[in-house]
Amino acid sequence: AVVGPIEGWTPMEAVYWSIVTLTTVGYGDLVPTKDASVWFCTVFFIPSSLFFLSFFLAHVAKSYIQLHAIHVTRLERGMRQKLERRRALAERSERAKRNANATAANTSDSNGEIVPTTASPKD
């Protein structure tokens, strides 16, 4: 903390001022008044804090996007599995219908042999 000793602030006040200024809140309760600290803030502290804050917020955004992508992938996988289960169920149901129609279309004669009928099953 460069500004704190120049201004005569306690270390706690200097850290408080740095955080408030870094986050661009700027309550105005602690303000650099000496020329050396004003120049330091203008030339070094504010540009470097904006640079740091930009990278920090970019990292937060990147983490959020990655978390969102993971969540979307999980939801998509669940939806695909549900669709596949429904398709498989529909296929089994259709197959069972065709088997039932084919069985109904065939009749047995008195010897137990299957004799196909002349009518074809309708799908």
Image: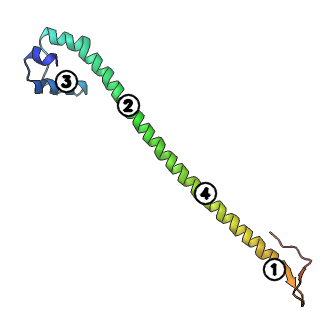
Mark earlier in primary sequence (1, 3):
3
54 on left or right of 73:
left
Q: Which mark is residue 87?
A: none
Question: What distance separates the C-alpha of mark 2 from that of mark 4?
Answer: 36 Å
- Kindly indicate the quadrant of the structure image that contains residue 110: bottom right
48 on left or right of 37:
right
Q: Residues within 10 Å of mark 1 (few under 14, many from 20)?
A: few
Residue 104, relative to residue 25: is it above or below?
A: below
Q: Which residue is mark 4?
A: 83
The amino acid marked with disc number 2 is His
Tell me the residue at 36%/25% (across/down): 55
Question: What distance separates the C-alpha of mark 3 from that of mark 4?
Answer: 55 Å
Locate residue 94, reporting x and y percent. Answer: 72, 67
100 on left or right of 72:
right
Tell me the residue at 16%/26% (across/down): 15
Residues at badges 2 and 4 in contact (C-beta under 8 Å)?
no
Residues at badges 3 and 2 in contact (C-beta under 8 Å)?
no
Locate residue 103, reporting x and y percent. Answer: 81, 78
Mark earlier in primary sequence (3, 4):
3
Q: Which residue is mark 3?
A: 18
Q: Secondary structure at mark 2?
A: helix
Q: Which residue is mark 2?
A: 59
